[in-house]
């Protein structure tokens, strides 16, 4: 494993971290905890989780593993989070920190994120007098948190403005080949400010593995662009080297503006719809249009198959039920034009129904 400096904090952190968002919750927590132990045995030292991950089981799974790693705690960095959209006061922030500490089985959180800042109002809420940030500062003074950091899905220019306020020691960003064009400025801003940067969703929530052929240009000399198991990720990190300018130019030459318009399946829209439209299902289906340039006829053919066998089968509500309230677009980390897409899909649904 290779290690990198986290900003200017003097911390050597493993180049590959362990993210706790996608455990198989059909399996026992103890079995999932074995994944952390295996990752740590390979040299991974950065472990990231959050409340609500994996049906609110992730912090508990981490706790099982972290208790077994207690003798090596000095070499492990634990990250968790709290949403300003749920945490409105300093008291609530302190309560959230204490709850996470108890679940994780540790006495200090190394990195605590102001989490899921998807719009500036979230940031402003966190920073208001008596708000979340104030509570986190109090926890930091008590030794319950080492470093206060931020996790954001805003566009790069907005994140730059936040980082320039100087309140955080690092940033967690959704950065991958699909969204780098509009988020890379945030990485650059963090670097310029001497802040730590952690990249989440490097495989775009699974979208890149699902369309490996389309992203074959990312690999060379027999590489695949998507091998992502723990062992493989560590091997890749061990032999990785910085991109040369010609590498960046080659990659940019293959990235179209349409790639920025893909749903990554993060799922933040799922709880937002007042009429229970499974927005993420529809947006994942819609990915075929910008990614493959499929025509309307092809999309309707795919729609029929998905309605019977796939992600659009047996839905609680359909695209045509959209009330255009905008809650899904507000929640979307990719800032997609969801309402417009749902209207287009609703038109296809009517056409398919008329043909059956």
Image: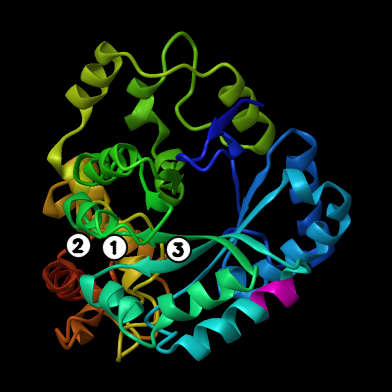
Is residue 219 shown in magenta?
A: no
Q: Which mark is residue 309?
A: 3
Element class at badge 1: helix
Q: Closer to us: mark 2 or mark 3?
A: 2
Disc 2 from disc 3: Cα separation: 26 Å
Mark 1 lies on residue: 283
Percent position of residue 215, x then y: 35, 30
Establish if 226 lies above or below 153.
Answer: above
Local crowd size for mark 3, using a 10 Å CA cut-off: few (<14), some (14–19), many (≥20): few
Q: CA distance from mark 3 to mark 1?
A: 17 Å
**Decide: marks 2, 1 in contact (CB < 8 A)?**
yes
Q: Which mark is residue 336?
A: 2
Please provide percent x and percent y for residue 21.
57, 60
Identify the residue at the far front of this view: 141
State the residue at coordinates (20%, 57%): 161
Dominant SS type (magenta): helix
């Amino acid at each position: 494993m290779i290690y990198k400096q986290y900003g200017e904090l003097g911390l050597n952190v493993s180049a590959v971290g362990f993210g706790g968002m996608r455990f198989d919750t059909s399996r026992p927590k103890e079995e999932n905890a074995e994944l952390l132990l295996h990752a740590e045995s390979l040299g991974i030292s950065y472990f990231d989780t959050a409340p609500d991950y994996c049906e609110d089981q992730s912090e508990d799974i981490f706790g099982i593993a972290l208790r077994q790693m207690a003798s090596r705690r000095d070499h492990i960095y634990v990250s968790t989070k709290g949403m300003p959209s749920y945490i409105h006061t300093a008291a609530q922030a302190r309560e959230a920190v204490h709850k996470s500490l108890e679940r994780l089985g540790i006495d200090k959180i190394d990195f605590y994120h102001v989490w899921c800042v998807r719009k500036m109002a979230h940031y402003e809420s966190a920073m208001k007098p008596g708000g979340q940030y104030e509570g986190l500062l109090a926890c930091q003074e008590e030794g319950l948190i080492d470093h206060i950091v931020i996790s954001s899905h805003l566009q790069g220019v907005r994140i730059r403005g936040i980082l320039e306020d100087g309140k955080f020691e690092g940033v967690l960003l959704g950065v991958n080949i699909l969204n780098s064009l509009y988020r890379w400025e945030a990485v650059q801003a963090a670097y310029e400010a001497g802040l730590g940067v952690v990249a989440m969703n490097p495989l775009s929530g699974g979208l890149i593995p699902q369309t490996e052929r389309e992203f074959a240009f990312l690999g060379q000399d027999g590489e695949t662009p998507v091998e992502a198991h723990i062992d493989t990720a560590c091997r890749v990190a061990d032999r990785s080297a910085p991109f040369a300018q010609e590498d960046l130019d080659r990659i940019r030459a293959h990235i179209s503006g349409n790639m920025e318009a893909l749903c990554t399946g993060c799922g933040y829209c799922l709880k937002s719809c007042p009429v229970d439209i499974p927005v993420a299902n529809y947006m994942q289906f819609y990915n075929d249009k910008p990614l493959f340039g499929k025509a309307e006829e092809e999309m309707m053919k795919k729609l029929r198959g998905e309605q019977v066998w796939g992600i659009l089968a047996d839905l609680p509500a359909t695209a045509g039920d959209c009330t255009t309230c905008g809650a899904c677009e507000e929640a979307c980390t990719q800032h997609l034009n969801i309402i417009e897409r749902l209207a287009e899909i609703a038109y296809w649904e009517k056409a398919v129904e008329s043909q059956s």
